[in-house]
Image (tube, coloured by chain):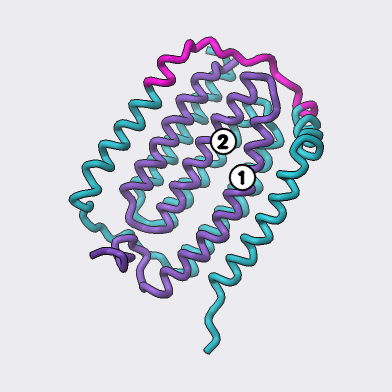
Chain colours: A purple, B cyan
Amino acid sequence: MVPTNYYLILSAILFGLGVFAFIFKRNIITIFMSIELMLNAVNLAFVAFSQALGKLDGQVFVLFVIVVAAAEAAVGLGIIILIARNRQSLNVERVDLLKL
Amino acid sequence: MTPQLLIFFVLAALAVLGAVSLILQKHPIHSALSLIVVMVALAGLYLLMGAEFVAAVQIIVYGGAIMVLFVFVIMLLNAGIEEHTSLSKFAGPPGLLLVVALAGFLAATIARSTGTVQAAGQTGAMASTKGISSMLFRDFVYPFELTSFLILVAIMGAVVLAQREKS
């Protein structure tokens, strides 16, 4: 039996790497992928707690998170296509209309 | 070391390596493939925890649908190698500090927890899937119906956003 702590530590590591990628990557598609990575890390914690407590609520929540992630991916990629069409670049540094 | 622990460490190493590879790769398509590795490794971990249904959904929806969408958009936009620009002078150091602070906070929280949270017994595969379905359609039926509405709105939003303006 794997202790629940191990899953939580792995979840924290993956979430941290997701935050790191979110802050330091420049390509907007990669930034979007790092959001998915963070959602996955949270899902892992949900399932780990569901197993630890012997209740299935966590697994049902994971399904809802996956549905929201799918909807978010569809809308977000539409926005990315719009940005690429309007700015001719995927670099977030080039999307600076609000910058002084 | 029990076989389960061994499988856990292999899959965990795979997931962390995939995430690190996502950060290090310069081309978005390589990052997307790294993310698929992470998702498949997580699906294996769900199987290890006895959450068969979540593992299947993870593979089908995340590894299948969402990542195909990502790869499709990367190829549609013909995304090239990430051009490197220097970090913002104002946002860079605080951002790095925040990453370190978050990692420290998570590590401290996990270290402070007693570490005696043990699994309360493995539920069988069929019992788990059966339990999820009865919860989903009994206790969570309104949220479940709302998700169909959410997906409908997302589909319409994506179509409206990505369509070409006719003029």
Q: Which residues are magenta?
A: B108-127
Tell whether B5 sits left or right of A62.
Answer: left
Q: Which residue lies at the image location 37% right of the left edge and 64% below the top edge?
A: A90
Q: Is B116 inside the magenta-drawn segment? A: yes
User: Of the residues shown, which amino acid type is indicated by label 1?
Assistant: Ile
Q: In the rendered image of this protein, does residue B133 appear above or below residue B85?
A: above
Residue B12 at what x, y percent from top left? 49, 29
Tell whether A51 sits left or right of B10.
Answer: right
Q: In the rendered image of this protein, does residue A2 appear above or below residue A35?
A: above
Residue A4 at what x, y percent from top left? 55, 19
Task: Considering the whole magenta stretch, tell me its main secondary structure.
Answer: loop
Q: Which residue is mark 2?
A: A43
Tag 1, which secondary structure?
helix
Question: Looking at the image, do the residues carrying marks 2 and 1 touch, with CB atoms under 8 Å apart?
Answer: yes
Crowding around mark 2 (Cα neighbors within 10 Å: few <14, some 14 to 19, many 20+) is many
Q: Which residue is mark 1?
A: A66
Do the residues indicated by labels 2 and 1 lie within the same chain of the protein?
yes
Which is nearer the eye, B41 or B116?
A: B116
Q: Is A19 inside the magenta-drawn segment? A: no
Q: Quadrant of residue B124?
A: top right
Q: In the rendered image of this protein, does residue A24 appear above or below residue B102?
A: below
Number of numbered discs visible in the structure rendering:
2
User: Of the residues shown, which amino acid type is indicated by label 2?
Assistant: Asn
